Image (tube, rainbow, N blue to C red):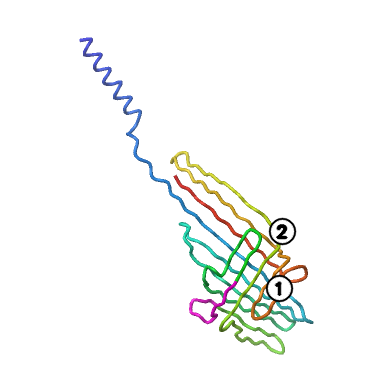
Amino acid sequence: MRRAIFLGCATFLFGSLAAYAGPPDMPKEPRVHSQRVTENANGGFCSQVGDLWRCRNFSIVATSEPSGKYRETIVSLDQWRNWPGGFANRHVECPVPRQALRVMPDKAIVEVTFDADAPECVSYGAIITYEPEYSSEPWLYTGIQTLEATMLAPKFQDRRVTSYTYKDNEAGTTQRENCHGGSGWEPQSGGFTMIGLYRAFGPGEATGTFYYDTCGLTLK
């Protein structure tokens, strides 16, 4: 009788321990890695002639998919004019080849030619006058456009190395992102050519910025 009671208690004890321990370990999901890369350069120049203010500006951005695979490079050009009796502006943006932009820790190089009339481009613009009466007419970029920029000797630079970790302790998951990048602004040498006009970078001349950023994300 005592032997039967002992065996029954032992069976109950080990069964309870097994239940407490929970189900057997399941294989964990594999880690997921992704990477994003962003590069950018932009610059411009403004001037005044009498009552006329005018500016021209460029921007070019290269991005990647979360997998790290190259996605696209987009270039945009803008012009503004402003005078007492009205204003004008025009904008165009187009996808261009990856090699149009090269960003390095201390400089950026832009070399691209594109057709503003291509169907993949977005373009808009108008000239608006208020005097002697209101009028509006289109002002668009058309035909072949060339943008060249050499951004050298930035007055200011920074370097970034960051690490960020997020944990969901209840779900048992972790996200970790490591990034490195940098930027430079107010180049003191070089210049840019847009709409056939060249302007140097430097004090009292054109200005601009460039940056790059590479981030790797791990999920587990």
Q: Quadrant of the N terminus?
A: top left
Residue at 33% x, 24% y is 17
Q: Farthest residue in the bottom direction?
A: 132
Q: Position of residue 198 (x, y in %)?
A: 69, 77
Q: Quadrant of residue 204?
A: bottom right
Residue at 61% x, 70% y is 110
Q: Circle 2 sits on which residue? A: 156
Q: Position of residue 131 (x, y in %)?
A: 71, 87
Q: Quadrant of residue 146?
A: bottom right
**Mark with earlier residue (2, 1):** 1
Q: What's the mark number on residue 58? A: none
Q: What's the mark number on residue 45? A: 1
Gap between marks 2 and 1 measured at Cα = 19 Å
Q: Position of residue 200 (x, y in %)?
A: 72, 72
Horizontal relation, residue 177 to residue 128: left or right: left
Residue at 27% x, 17% y is 9
Q: Quadrant of residue 45?
A: bottom right
| Image position of 177 with respect to 200: above or below | above
Choose between 201 and 174: the one closer to the eye.
201
**Dot 1 amino acid type:** Phe
Choose between 54 and 214: the one closer to the eye.
214
Instruction: Please tell me whether mark 2 sits on a helix, a strand or a loop.
Output: strand
Q: Position of residue 63 (x, y in %)?
A: 53, 63
Question: What range of the chain is rendered magenta?
Answer: 111-122
Residue at 54% x, 65% y is 62
